[in-house]
Amino acid sequence: MDINQLLKAGEYVLYEWLKDYQQLKQGIDYLEYKLDREETELKRWVEGDLAGVKLTDKSIVAKLEVGIQQLKKDIDLKKQQLKKLIDLVDTFKGVEHKILRLKYVDGLTLEKIADELNYSYSHIKKKHAELVKLIKFIDEQGII
């Protein structure tokens, strides 16, 4: 089966949803890191070593507060998008989608996936290796 047949068969969906999931997850992780950093800085201005500095409406603190609120909104939006994607993936049929979801979304080991899906460990390991190989090929070739 050549790559065009694979893509026509729908395997590209595996690649797309996994890529989207990873991008959303990384985006959320980064925004949460940034939020923590800005909340720490705000705490310095309110309770810490900068608490005695006179503030105005145009001060750094005002900008921090606005930035924090925007980050919280952005995180909530990305989390909603992530939930919608996971809900969509849950509707997909086929053992390939289940393996990828259980491995990369739920964080299960291949052994636990085999138990969950009632397949042998060697079958799941082989399927996973094929999927990883296909995804890497698609990504390296820039097919999608």
Image (cartoon, helix red, strand yellow):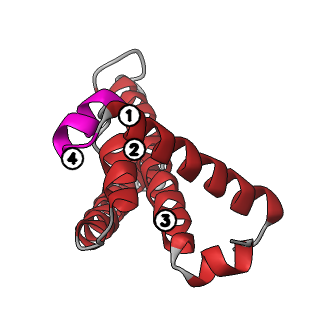
Query: How many neighbours does mark 3 have within 10 angstroms: few (below 14), some (14-19), or many (20 or more)?
Result: some
Residue located 21% across and 47% down the image: 117
Disc nearer the start of the sequence (1/4): 1
Q: Nearer the viewer, mark 2 or mark 4?
A: 4
As drawn, the label of residue 117 is 4
| Amino acid, disc 3 | Leu
Estimate the x, y position of residue 99 in percent, counting from the top left: 35, 49
Q: Is residue 127 magenta?
A: no
| Amino acid, disc 2 | Tyr
Question: Are the two marked residues, 3 and 1, in contact with CB atoms closer than 8 angstroms?
Answer: no
**Residue under circle 3?**
14
| Residue closest to the eye, 31 or 114 | 114
Q: Nearer the viewer, mark 3 or mark 1?
A: 3
Label count reads 4
Secondary structure category for the residue under label 3 = helix
**Residue under circle 2?**
104
**Residue under circle 1?**
36
Residue located 30% across and 72% down the image: 92
Query: As displayed, is residue 61 above or below residue 142?
Result: above
